[in-house]
Image: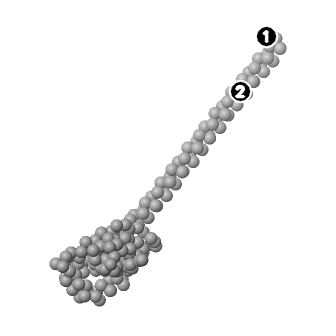
């Protein structure tokens, strides 16, 4: 082998080595980029899951307030004249604070009114949703259809009544503290 051939072979070997090194470096960079993308995707998924869990747990509170208030309003709208005392007890059981005190102070009049009804009033919640919530306090806005809307603050001329209900969470349920018919 001549000196020229040796130099050419060395140049070829070095060029091949440089290309291989460059190729390996490119593969390493590509692998690093893939790893970074996978890591960012994992962080995004974990963050989304934590956010969804937070929203879901907060949603449970809101759903609980709306469900408990809707159930209590349905009880208030559908008294049984044959069991007026039982009706008042059910309403008291779903009430707290000022609402409970009002019902307790007017217990005799409410019992008498319900017992004097000739037919059992019908009522249902058409729509209800959370207007505001702050910890253990919530405001629910509901639209009720009732044959006797006076039971929840409406007038006897109303077929549907919109009611703003303030509720508090006590133990594991929401209790009504105030009802206010809205125009």
Q: Residue at x 27, y 74 (%)?
A: 147
In the picture shown, does residue 120 fall above or below 108?
Answer: above
- Number of residues whose C-alpha sits closer than 10 Å to that of mark 2, classed few (under 14), some (14–19) or many (20 or more): few
Q: Secondary structure at mark 1?
A: loop
Residue 49 falls left or right of residue 160: right
Q: Residue at x 29, y 89 (%)?
A: 105
Q: Secondary structure at mark 2?
A: helix
Q: Nearer the viewer, residue 41 or 2?
A: 41
In the picture shown, does residue 148 fall above or below 16?
Answer: below
Q: Residue at x 28, y 88 (%)?
A: 106
> Which disc number belongs to residue 1?
1
Q: CA distance from mark 1 to mark 2?
A: 25 Å
- x, y (%) of residue 146? 30, 73
Q: Nearer the viewer, residue 149 or 73?
A: 149
> Which disc number belongs to residue 19?
2
**Residue lying at the far right of the rendered structure:** 3
Q: Residue at x 42, y 77 (%)?
A: 183
- x, y (%) of residue 26? 66, 34
């Amino acid at each position: 082998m001549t000196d020229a051939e040796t130099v050419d072979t060395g140049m070829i070997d070095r060029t091949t080595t440089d290309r291989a090194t460059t190729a390996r470096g490119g593969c390493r960079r590509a692998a690093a980029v893939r790893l970074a993308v996978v890591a960012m995707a994992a962080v995004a998924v974990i963050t989304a899951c934590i956010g969804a869990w937070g929203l879901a747990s907060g949603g449970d509170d809101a759903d609980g307030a709306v469900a408990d208030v809707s159930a209590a309003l349905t009880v208030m709208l559908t008294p049984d004249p044959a069991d007026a005392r039982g009706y008042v007890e059910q309403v008291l059981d779903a009430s707290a604070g000022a609402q409970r005190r009002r019902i307790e102070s007017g217990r005799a009049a409410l019992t008498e009114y319900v017992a004097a009804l000739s037919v059992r009033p019908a009522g249902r919640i058409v729509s209800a949703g959370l207007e505001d919530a702050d910890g253990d306090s919530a405001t629910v806005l509901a639209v009720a259809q009732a044959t006797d809307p006076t039971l929840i603050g409406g007038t006897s001329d109303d077929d549907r009544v919109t009611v703003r209900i303030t509720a508090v969470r006590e133990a594991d349920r929401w209790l009504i503290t105030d009802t206010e018919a809205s125009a």
